[in-house]
Image (cartoon, rainbow, N blue to C red):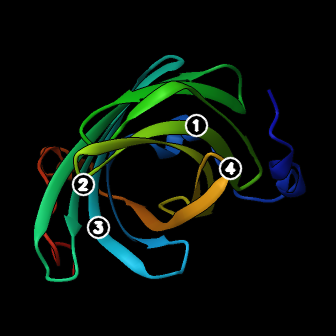
Amino acid sequence: MTITSTKTYARSTPEFLLDQFFSGPMAASGIFCDRNRRVRNRFFMHLFGAWQGDQGTLEERFTFLDDQGTCTHAERVWKLEMLDHKNFRGTAKGSAGDLVGLAEGASEGYAMHWRYTVRQPVGDKQYNLRTDDRMFLLDDNHVANHSRMHFWGIFVGEAIIEIHRLPAEMAERVRSYPQPGEYQ
C-alpha cells in the first residue's frame, strides 16, 4: 500500500522510520479543535513504544484538560506491524477509543501518513471518526502531527500534536498519566 500524499516528500530527509521513532519513552502535547476552530480539549500524552522484529506495541496515556482545567484520563494501546521498510498497519484498543478495522499507513522521506477509523467516546455516546493522520519528522527526536477527523464525510475537527522522544531512563515515568506542566 502506498498513500500518494507522502510521495511529495520521497526525496526529503531525515527519513521517518516508524519503528525507530516510536521506540522507547516519549511525551507529547496538543489541542483538539472543532470544525469551527474552537479549542475543545488540550491534552498531554505519555507514549512508550517497543518492537520485536516487525511487530510493535505503542502505549499512549492521555491527560485531557477542559476549559476549566479539569483533568480526565484515557489510554490506547496500538499493535503495529511493519509490512516493509515504508508501509505499516495496526489496530488499537483503549478508553481513548478503539480502532474499527485496521489502520494503514506509509512513509516517504520525513513524512508519514496513515488512515483509520476510531470509535471515539463523547459523553455517553460513541462516534466512528474517520481519521486522516499526517506526521512530519522535524529531527531525530521531534515529530509534528496533524490529524483531521470526519463523521459520515463531514469534517468534525482536528488535532495538532508535538511529540518528542525522551531519554531511555524515563521509561518508567511514561507508564503513568502525564501531569500538566511536567516537562517545562
Q: Residue at x 28, y 58 (%)?
A: 45
Q: Nearer the viewer, residue 60 or 165?
A: 60
- Specify whether 44 is left or right of 156: left
Q: Residue at x 58, y 37 (%)?
A: 116
Q: Amino acid at mark 1?
A: Tyr
Q: Secondary structure at mark 3?
A: strand
- Specify whether 43 is left or right of 130: left
Name the mark on residue 116.
1
Give the alpha-carbon distance from disc 4 to disc 2, as whole Å.
Answer: 27 Å
- Quarter holding residue 119: top left
Q: Secondary structure at mark 4?
A: loop
- Specify whether 148 is left or right of 111: left
Query: Does the image show residue 144?
Result: no
Name the mark on residue 91.
none
Q: Secondary structure at mark 1?
A: strand
Q: Amino acid at mark 2?
A: Phe
Give the alpha-carbon distance from disc 4 to disc 3, as whole Å.
Answer: 25 Å
Q: Nearer the viewer, residue 74 or 5?
A: 74
Q: Amino acid at mark 3?
A: Phe
Q: Amino acid at mark 4?
A: Gly
Which residue is tagged 3?
43
Name the mark on residue 62.
2
User: Quick one: label 4 or label 2, which is nearer the N terminus?
Assistant: 2
Q: Secondary structure at mark 2?
A: strand
Q: Tell me if residue 58 comes above or below residue 160 in the rendering.
A: above
Which residue is tagged 4?
153
Query: Closer to us: mark 1 or mark 4?
Result: 4
Do the residues under discs 2 and 3 have CB atoms within 8 angstroms?
A: yes
Give the alpha-carbon distance from disc 2 to disc 3, as whole Å.
Answer: 7 Å
Q: Nearer the viewer, residue 44 or 49?
A: 44
